[in-house]
Amino acid sequence: MRKIFTITALIILVSMSVKAQWMPQATGFPQPSVGINYISAVNQNVLWAIGYDGSGGTALMQSFTKTTDGGTTWTAGTISGFTTYEPSMICAIDANTAWVPLFTSNSLGGVLVKTTDGGATWTQQNTAAFAAPDGFPNVVHFWDADNGFCMGDPMGGYFEIYTTTNGGTTWARTPQANIPAILSGEFGVVGYYSVVGNTIWYGTNKGRVYKSVDKGLNWTVSVTSFSNHYVDVDFLTQTYGIAREMGTGTGTITGQLCETMDGGTTWTSIPLPTLMYTSGFSWVPGTPNYCVTTGSAATASGAAFSFNGGHTWTDFDATSGVQFLHTAWVDNSNGWAGAFTDQTTPSTVGGMYKYGGVLTDIMQIDPKQGDVKVYPNPSNGNLTFAIVGFENKDVTVSIFNSLGQAVYSNVCKENLISYNYNADLSSFSSGVYFAKIQCGKKIINQKLVIE
C-alpha cells in the first residue's frame, strides 16, 4: 500500500536570506535538491538525518547525513547494499549507533538496518521479518543500546510489531492477542509515532492512535477527532499530547489539531489556528508547552512557534515563504529544521537550518523594547538568562546578595535578536538574591531564589 511523507516534493525557488535566528547549514549531500525528511537529535552536538530526492523525480535514495558538532559540519553517507529501498526515518542513540527502517512500494517488503560504526557499514536485522510483498517497517525506536521496538503495517491480520532487548540481534513479534484489532484497510505511516518514557503512540490512516505503556508488549487504541484521516501524534508528557490531521492520502492536508490530557484515551479538537504548517512538528524539551511547526507546501512554507500547546501560532521572523522540512529540538536554544541542498553547489550550500536564538515566551514582546527572563527561579544556582532585543549590544548581568553586596558580574553580547546567557551560581549559599541586567540606559531587575 502507498505511503505518504509530510513533505512536498518540489522545491520552491525563494530567497535563502532567513534572519539571523535561523542559520543555514550544509548537509554535505553531493546532489542538488536533496531534502531532509527526518532528523534524530541525540543531543545538542550529535544529530543524524535522512535525505530524499526533492527534485520532483522518483529516484530512491539511501542517503543520510550526520554531525557531531551541532551542525557546524555535516558528513553525508549512503546506506549501501539496499538500492531498491528508501528510508522511512532514523533513530540514533549516539554518534556511532543508529537504526533505519527501509521500505519500498515495489512489493519487495521492507528491511530494518543498523550501524555501529557511524554509518560506514549497515547490517540487516533479519528477525524483524517485514516480508514481501506487503511488509513495511514504518518506525523504529531505541531507548538505549539494547531495548527497542519497531512497527510495520498489518501482516496476517494484525500490526507487525517487534520488540528487542539485545540491540536488535533478535526481535520477537508482539502476539496478535496483545494488539487491538485493525479496521478494514487500516495501516500505519512512516515516521508517525511518539515516545515518552516507556510509552509509545503511533497514528494510522483511520484517525486512530495505538498506545503501549510497556515498550511495545501490550497495546490499546483510541479514536481521535479525525476519523478516516491520516493522523500523526506528538506527546510532551505521558498524559499530554497532540494529534495532527494529515489528510487522506490525496488532496489537502489541513493540519488541524486535537489534544489529549489523559494519555490518548480521549481527544478534544483545537480550533484551527491561523498559522499551522504540516511538514514537521516538535515539542521543545525543557519548556512548559512550547512547540514548533514547519512547512514546505507551495502556499504554506515557513516556520512558526506556539507557547500554548498549538492553540495559537506566530511566524518566526522572515521565514514565511521559505521551505522548512522536518524539525527536531533538544532544548529551547538548540533546534534544527530540514531544507534542500543548493541547485549549483549542493555539497557546500543548504540542506539544513539551525535555530540561533532562544525560544522563550518573551519573544512575543517588541524586540525594540528589550526584556530578560531568568529561569528556573527558584533554582539550584544554575541560571539561564533569556535575553531579547539587545542584538549586538553589551548586556551587563550583576548579582547582589540580600545585603546589597555585588557577588557576580559579567558582560554578554551576541549578534542575535534573542539568546541564552548561562550563569553558574551553584556555589552560592541558599537565599534571596537580586539580578540587575543593564543595557545602556535600560535596567531590568529580577528577584532570585537559590535553594
Image: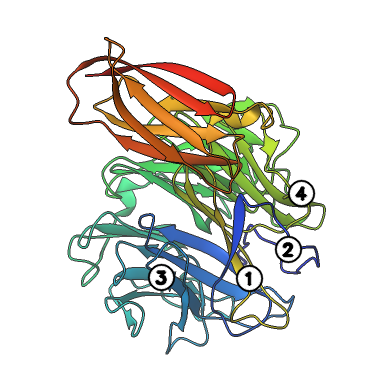
Left or right, 201 with reference to 346: left
Q: Secondary structure at mark 1?
A: strand
Q: Tell me what residue is drawn at x 78 percent, y 54 percent.
A: 321
- Residues tagged 4 and 3 counted as in contact (Cβ below 8 A): no
Quarter holding the C terminus is top left
Q: Secondary structure at mark 3?
A: strand
Q: Tell which tag, 2 or 3, sits nearer the viewer.
A: 2
Quarter of the figure with residue 121 = bottom left
Q: Which mark sits nearer the N-terminus, 4 or 2?
A: 2
Amino acid type, residue under disc 1 in the picture = Gly
Q: Tell me what residue is drawn at x 63 percent, y 52 percent.
A: 20
Q: Residue beneath label 3, please?
A: 100
- Residues tagged 2 and 1 counted as in contact (Cβ below 8 A): yes
Compute the Cα span from label 4 to label 3. 32 Å
Q: Residue beneath label 2, please?
A: 16
Compute the Cα span from label 1 to label 4. 17 Å
Compute the Cα span from label 4 to label 2. 11 Å
Q: Tell which tag, 4 or 3, sits nearer the viewer.
A: 4
Task: List x then y, in percent, for residue 267.
Answer: 54, 28
Q: Residue beneath label 1, please?
A: 350
Compute the Cα span from label 1 to label 3. 23 Å
- Residues tagged 1 and 3 counted as in contact (Cβ below 8 A): no
Kindly tell me whether residue 420 is visible in this rendering: yes
Q: Which mark sits nearer the N-terminus, 2 or 1?
A: 2
Q: Which mark sits nearer the N-terminus, 4 or 3?
A: 3
Amino acid type, residue under disc 2 in the picture = Met
